[in-house]
Amino acid sequence: MAANYPTITKSNEIWARSVGLIPGGTQTLAKGPGQWTEGVAPKYLKKGKGARVWDVDGNEYIDLIMGVGPISLGYGYAAVDDAIRAQLDDGITFSLMHPLEVEVGELLREVVPGAESVRYSKTGCDATTVAVRLARAFTKREKVLACGYHGWHDWYISVTDRNAGIPESTKDLTFTFKYNDLQSVEDALDDSVACVILEPTVFEAPKPGFLEGLRALCDKFGALLVFDEMWTGFRVAVGGAQQRYGVRADLACFSKAMANGMPISAITGRADVMRLCEKDVFFFTTFGGEALSLAATKATIEELRKHDVPAFLAKQGQKLREGYTAIAKESGLETTTKCFGYDARTIITFADDRSSPLAMKTFVQQEMIARGILWSGFHNLSFSHGDAEVGAILAAYREVLPMLASALKDKAVEGSLRGKVLEPVFRKTDNFHMKPRKA
């Protein structure tokens, strides 16, 4: 597989036009230039089909990002696109409600455990934020314990280093706990906490009894348990983490994979809690019932269930994880780089005294891109990642990992980079892993 660093002239021309026009240059941080190798990675994609994408300069790649999660079936997936086109003929947004609101709600109730009631919005952070508001209204409490990433809204982003513009009073209401550490939750949980919200798994698997222990602690202290299923929903199982791990959440939030790229999110859960949305908790939005996204959701979930897509993702992801691990070992990098996570979504990590983790990631990214793989350190798979795509990805690793080993031996990783080292996204700040202050 010959290395061929792509020509990205048009990408750079469009980027130059964005400077000063679009702050940060991007609408999604993971898509922005700080996460991609300068001078090598394309900045703008034009089209996609299956598991492949083409940039504005015409270069083709196998995509391992899949829209940062939403593309669960594949780009241009016929059953979903046909449903969107059929609905487009009838209309997009109407002056009254649309039957798809009920039809999709019934489908979600059927496949998601505990989904007694359903409401829709457009983004994942909309869903997590209304979950927090519902929990506060239901429990008559204010503090939140969080674990994982939950979006840009004030209640969560206040615990990161990107918290400018958020009142101190808001910052003092959210605290975080350590994943797989029940003691850190028990130390923080008291009768001032409205809810415990977490991603049921990110890459580290839940230890036996961890999720069950959270359920028991929330019951003991009267807090609600909220699952942020942006990544686990429809991937670890069609019904998400509640189905996979057999633990009931009071509220569960979904987006990303549920509509194969169309913008929609959903909050599901206990009817007695969700009923507060009828009057007490104001959660209404013009585009909540937008019909194209609802049509896409219905078609996507039906396809996920029909083909048992989570099992397929796990099978293909296992091939990648085991293949990467074997190639790393053959390259003498078994202690330098690891591939782990649940098989449908794994992460590559680096640790070596001879270079920084971000420099090694940058090196691997530029060389994978040169071999036609759009790579950001994750394996985010779709139903369109067949054996040919998996084989091509592993073939690229067989070339790139020995190159990394050689560069480390010569202490030349940084000197081999064609652009700047990639940027970190967040840093942990003061309120991480702290007990909530008493009122």
Image (tube, grey):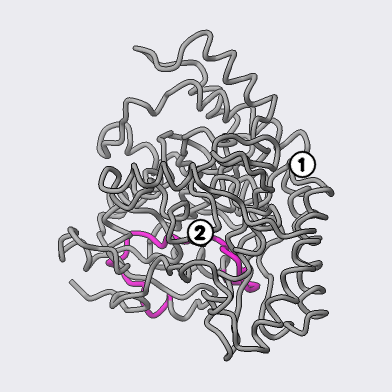
**Would you place residue 374 above or below residue 279 in this image?**
below
Task: Name the one closer to the observer, 81 or 416.
Answer: 416
Of callouts 1 and 2, the N-terminal one:
2
Q: Considering the image in quadrants, where does the N terminus appear?
A: bottom right
The residues colored magenta run 185-210
Q: Is residue 234 above or below residue 78?
A: below
Task: Look at the image and tell me in which quarter the C terminus lies.
Answer: bottom left
Coordinates of residue 72 in the picture (x, y in percent):
64, 42
179 to the left or right of 298: left
- At a point 21% along the width and 75% down the height, the residue shown is 438
Instruction: Give residue 92's mark.
Output: none
> Residue pushed farthest top?
90
Does the magenta portion include 161? no
The mark lying in front, picked from 1 and 2, is: 2
Question: Which residue corresponds to the image point at 63% horizontal and 73% vertical from the top-left?
Answer: 207
Judged left or right of residue 383, residue 422 is left
Can residue 52 be spotted in the picture? yes
x, y percentage for residue 333? Answer: 73, 82
Name the residue beneath numbered marker 2.
39
Total numbered labels placed on residues in the image = 2
Res 189 quadrant in image? bottom left
Q: Nearer the viewer, residue 369 or 155?
A: 369
Question: Image height check: is 322 above or below 131?
Answer: below
| Mark 1 and mark 2 residues within 8 Å of each other at the beta carbon | no
Three-letter amino acid code at disc 1?
Answer: Asp
Mark 1 element type: loop
Query: What residue does disc 1 label?
Result: 308
Q: Is residue 192 magenta?
A: yes
Three-letter amino acid code at the position of disc 2: Gly
